[in-house]
């Protein structure tokens, strides 16, 4: 998907659906979180790395736009990217696809805080750099043969 350098797959479980077999609206936020945590693992050493240096990343706002329903057993691809890293704040954007058709999109806004005081603290420079690299194919630690495969998978 254009503009997104990362994606992960989720499968709609029966427990995530209503009586009509349609995924409940709140599950999209869970899928966004799955993609965000995997994105952080891939590019920044994982969410635990933030916690290990005494930082938490809180969710401030969420938004989702539903275009088509997801149904039980659908295989979905959740694309994620991090944008607008400023001061203590950053924003993730998402697109959810089924068979290359976008069925939902949305965003989450976050703030980094000191884990003890919960006072805002700037996003660490190493995290800013890692998140900036997430949109490029020259990601440190990713062998060159995998970069080409990754790009082909994400372009469909």
Image (cartoon, rainbow, N blue to C red):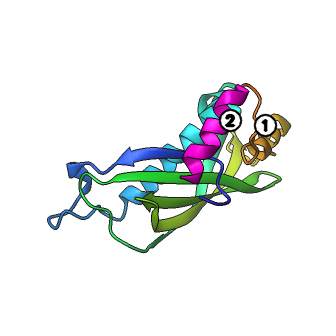
- The reply, left or right, for residue 22 in relation to residue 6 is left
Do labels 2 and 1 touch, CB within 8 Å? yes
x and y, in percent, of residue 64 in the image: 49, 68
- Residue at image point 62% right, 31% down: 46
Report whether residue 54 is seen: no
Q: Using a 10 Å C-alpha cutoff, classify the residue at mark 2 as few (fewer than 14 neighbours), some (14 to 19) or many (20 or more).
A: some
Query: What is the magenta range?
Result: 143-156
Instruction: Considering the whole magenta stretch, tell me its main secondary structure.
Output: helix
Is residue 145 shown in magenta? yes
- Residue at image point 37% right, 56% down: 27
Q: Using a 10 Å C-alpha cutoff, classify the residue at mark 1 as few (fewer than 14 neighbours), some (14 to 19) or many (20 or more).
A: few
Considering depth in this image, is 103 or 131 the residue closer to the camera?
Answer: 103
Residue ranking furthest to the left: 19
Q: Secondary structure at mark 2?
A: helix
x and y, in percent, of residue 21 in the image: 19, 62
Is residue 60 shown in magenta? no
Considering depth in this image, is 5 or 45 the residue closer to the camera?
Answer: 5
Report whether residue 39 is seen: yes
The residue at which mark 1 appears reads as: 138
CA gap between label 2 and label 1 equals: 8 Å
Q: Secondary structure at mark 1?
A: loop
The residue at which mark 2 appears reads as: 147
**Residue 44: mark:** none
- The reply, left or right, for residue 29 in relation to residue 43 is left
Q: Quadrant of the N terminus?
A: bottom right
- The reply, left or right, for residue 16 in relation to residue 115 is left
x and y, in percent, of residue 30 in the image: 42, 51
């Amino acid at each position: 998907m254009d503009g997104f350098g990362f994606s992960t797959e989720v499968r709609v479980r029966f427990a995530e659906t209503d009586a009509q077999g349609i995924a409940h609206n709140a599950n999209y936020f869970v899928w966004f979180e799955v993609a965000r945590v995997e994105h952080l693992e891939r590019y920044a050493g994982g969410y635990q790395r933030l916690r290990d240096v005494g930082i938490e990343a809180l969710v401030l706002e969420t938004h989702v736009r539903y275009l088509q329903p997801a149904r039980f057993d659908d295989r979905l691809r959740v694309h994620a990217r991090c944008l607008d890293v400023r001061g203590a704040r950053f924003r993730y954007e998402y697109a959810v696809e089924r068979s290359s058709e976008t069925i939902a999109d949305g965003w989450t806004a976050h703030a980094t805080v000191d884990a003890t005081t919960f006072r805002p603290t700037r996003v660490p420079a190493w995290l800013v750099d890692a998140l900036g690299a997430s949109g490029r194919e020259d990601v440190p630690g990713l062998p060159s043969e995998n970069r080409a495969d990754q790009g082909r998978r994400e372009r469909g």
